[in-house]
């Protein structure tokens, strides 16, 4: 198993991870994980743990993980939005086929407000994109 282990382990936490250096080169052949840093995904900050001095190899591994994590989280955001579109379609189907008056009364106003807010934001952002892409006359 020791040959298959990565050099670093990233314990995911909210807004980032705690970084451990994985060590199996000891007399007991145990897996030791030494905490070396914390990483903040939102601002890219990397803080060494205690008196740890991060090597260029440590920094490169952390930077690679950070780039991959940011890309993964961005992809998840898009997936969530695609799911929201599906939920809107399923909600429309529910309204058309299954909803009774009491259920509709409980969801109509909050749904209309959320959809109005979403539509306003989408229209504003689309107009900004169109204005940015429009040729200067």
Image (spheres, grey):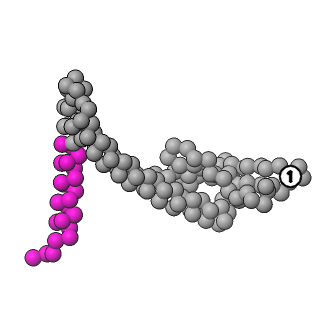
- Can residue 43 be seen? no
Q: Residue at x 43, y 56 (%)?
A: 75
Q: Residue at x 30, y 42 (%)?
A: 90
Quarter of the figure that contains the C terminus: bottom left
Q: Which residue matches tag 1?
A: 29
Q: Quadrant of residue 3?
A: bottom right
- Can residue 85 be seen? yes
Q: Position of residue 122 (x, y in %)?
A: 22, 53
Instruction: Out of 104 and 20, give the one closest to the viewer.
Output: 104
Instruction: Out of 59 and 82, give the one closest to the viewer.
Output: 82
Q: Position of residue 91 (x, y in %)?
A: 27, 39
Q: Quadrant of residue 126?
A: bottom left
Q: Position of residue 14 (x, y in %)?
A: 51, 43
Magenta highlight range: 116-137
Which residue is farthest left? 137
Which residue is farthest front? 97
Q: Position of residue 100 (x, y in %)?
A: 22, 26
């Amino acid at each position: 198993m020791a040959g298959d282990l990565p050099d670093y382990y990233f314990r995911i936490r909210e807004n980032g991870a705690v970084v451990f250096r994985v060590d199996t080169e000891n007399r007991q052949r145990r897996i030791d994980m030494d905490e070396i840093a914390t990483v903040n995904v939102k601002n890219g900050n990397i803080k060494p743990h205690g008196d740890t001095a991060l090597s260029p190899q440590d920094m490169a591994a952390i930077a690679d993980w950070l780039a991959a994590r940011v890309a993964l989280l961005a992809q998840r955001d898009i997936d969530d939005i695609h799911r929201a579109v599906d939920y809107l379609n399923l909600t429309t189907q529910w309204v058309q086929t299954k909803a009774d008056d009491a259920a509709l009364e409980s969801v109509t106003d909050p749904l209309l407000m959320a959809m109005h807010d979403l539509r306003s934001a989408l229209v504003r952002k689309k107009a900004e994109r169109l204005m940015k892409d429009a040729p200067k006359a």
